[in-house]
Image: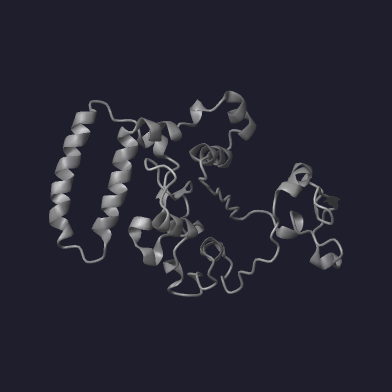
Amino acid sequence: MGGHKSVILLWMAGGPSHIDTLDPKPDQPENKRGPFGTIPTTLPGVHVCEHLPKYAKLTDKLTIIRSVDCRGSNHQPNTVMQTGFRAAAPRANREGAMYPAMGSLVGKLRGANDPVLPPYVVLNHRDRTHFAWGGWLGKNHDPFVGDNVSRLLQLPGGLSMERVRERRSLSRQIESIQRNLDQQGNMAALDTFGQRAYDLLLGNKAKEAWDVSREPQKIIDAYGKHPWAKKTLLARRLV
């Protein structure tokens, strides 16, 4: 809306092989192609795995890229793809983790579409190696890891909004002392994340954005109950 653009990246860690999905290579020898048959798509000349009939009907609205090369990334190419740099391979390059994610760059140069929401959100907290971070841009451009935010947004019993504001004021006074001792930018990052958490806690719009239960039931049912599916629906809702 209004020229705003957003990207949802579904990172299929451990997902099916390219030769079993979108790049079946049916004309290759048996030991170089997938075990399944292929079907034509709505894009002339393009075939995909026979088990993707719904995808095949949408191909004329999509772009399939079959030329990505992550060599040298040593089995875990996520940061290579999420930064656009082959050198962003922590297992092969000790500075690999310092290349900033595309989401971090967008957050720094453009900012969020909506000021009450973070510009770069990650809905995966189980494995920190599956997504790229702020790196050389600084910790304040790290992604907002937010798949459990909806539960965190509920105030504990006995804690009022006024007490939250009082605690925030006291916290800022303490941080101003600590900031003078900080040499690595950690306090600046804490300031950024603290403000985001504060805005999320007190802002109704942000809380509503993370509340998937507000979606129509037919949409919730269409996505399914699997945790991965729920995160996909949450990503859609945030956009």
Colour mode of the rendering: one colour
Q: Residue at x 15, y 63 (%)?
A: 181
Q: Is residue 198 above or below residue 160?
A: below
Q: Residue at x 22, y 66 (%)?
A: 183
Q: Is residue 222 above or below residue 173?
A: above
- Pinpoint residue 159: horizontal percent, then vertical percent: 23, 29
- Location of residue 135 by image quarter: bottom left
Point out the residue furthest to the front here.
2
Closest to the observer, 192 or 19: 192
Q: Is residue 185 shown left or right of residue 124? A: left
Residue 178 image point, x, y percent: 16, 57
Residue 125 visible to an observer of this rendering: no
Is 125 on the left-hand or right-hand side of 192? right
Q: Toward the viewer: 113 or 100?
A: 113
**Vertical side of 92 occupied by 9: above or below:** above
Q: How many marks?
A: 0
- Residue 216: percent from the left, percent from the top? 56, 25
Q: Quadrant of residue 80?
A: bottom right
Residue 119 placed where, x, y %?
43, 49
Q: Quadrant of residue 94?
A: bottom left
Identify which residue is drawn at 64% across, 53% down: 15
Residue 231 visible in the snapshot: yes
